[in-house]
Image (cartoon, rainbow, N blue to C red):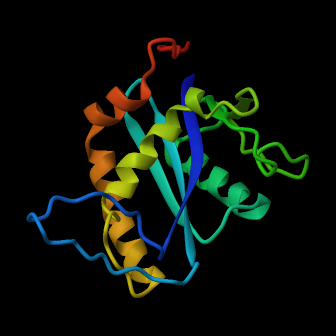
């Protein structure tokens, strides 16, 4: 049995604005889009190992979450021989009676309004880093950069483990 955490995050053409160093007397200029076009990042993390699984999808809703859950279950080999306990928040589409939960996946919900308890919540500053102060003409450009960012995060198990393995998080589920 493995204990994973999952959350969604929305990024868009309106950039993440960060402070930057500049010469005294020079004000940095950051180009921004005025369009509200979004991409949803589905992030799954196994805090004990630092392993992550990412999906970049157009929105968050019951149908898309069902697809994401099925994709995740297949990717980690969940089923009769491998049980996954997945910790998530209480978004409506996570707990809908219409949700199809794949074999081997067991959903556990955090208390309401408690993002600080969600290990996956600590992935979003990492995903935002690649987008900070950058201008994207299209959502496809943003998606390409975000996909590369997810691969980079996926390869850095130690950093992910440091950010998501809370001292109280259960380890070595059996």
Q: Indicate the position of residue 82 as horizontal and vertical percent values.
A: 58, 30
Q: Indicate the position of residue 17 as horizontal and vertical percent values.
A: 37, 63
Q: Is residue 16 left or right of residue 64?
A: left
* Quadrant assignment, res 116: top right
In which quadrant of the rendered image does the C terminus lie? Answer: top right
Between 1 and 165, the one nearer to me in the picture: 165
Between 25 and 61, the one nearer to me in the picture: 25
Residue at left offset 68%, top offset 60% = 67
How many marks do you count on the picture? 0
Residue at left offset 53%, top offset 14% = 170
* Quadrant assignment, res 40: bottom right
Outermost residue toward the bottom in this view:
137
Looking at the image, residue 150 lies above or below residue 44: below
Q: Indicate the position of residue 103 as horizontal and vertical percent values.
A: 72, 40
Q: Is residue 149 left or right of residue 98?
A: left
Looking at the image, residue 173 lies above or below residue 71: above
Residue at left offset 65%, top offset 50% = 69
Looking at the image, residue 8 lies above or below residue 174: below
Looking at the image, residue 83 lies above or below residue 126: above
In which quadrant of the rendered image does the N terminus lie? Answer: top right
Outermost residue toward the right in this view:
97
Between 17 and 54, the one nearer to me in the picture: 17
Q: Is residue 164 left or right of residue 68?
A: left
Outermost residue toward the left in this view:
23
Residue at left offset 28%, top offset 57% = 19
């Amino acid at each position: 049995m493995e204990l994973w955490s999952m959350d969604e995050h929305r990024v868009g053409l309106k950039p993440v604005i960060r402070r930057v160093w500049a010469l005294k007397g020079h004000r940095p200029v950051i180009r921004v889009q005025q369009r509200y076009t979004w991409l949803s990042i589905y992030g799954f993390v196994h805090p004990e190992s630092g392993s992550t699984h990412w999906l970049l999808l157009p929105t968050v809703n019951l149908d898309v979450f069902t697809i994401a859950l099925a994709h995740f279950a297949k990717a980690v080999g969940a089923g009769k021989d491998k049980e996954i306990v997945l910790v998530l928040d209480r978004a409506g589409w996570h707990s809908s009676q219409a949700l199809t939960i794949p074999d081997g996946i067991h959903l556990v919900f955090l208390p309401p309004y408690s993002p600080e308890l969600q290990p996956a919540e600590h992935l979003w500053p990492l995903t935002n880093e690649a987008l900070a102060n950058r201008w994207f003409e299209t959502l496809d450009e943003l998606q390409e950069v975000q996909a590369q960012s997810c691969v980079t995060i996926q390869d850095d198990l130690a950093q992910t483990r440091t950010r998501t393995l809370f001292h109280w998080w259960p380890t070595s589920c059996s």
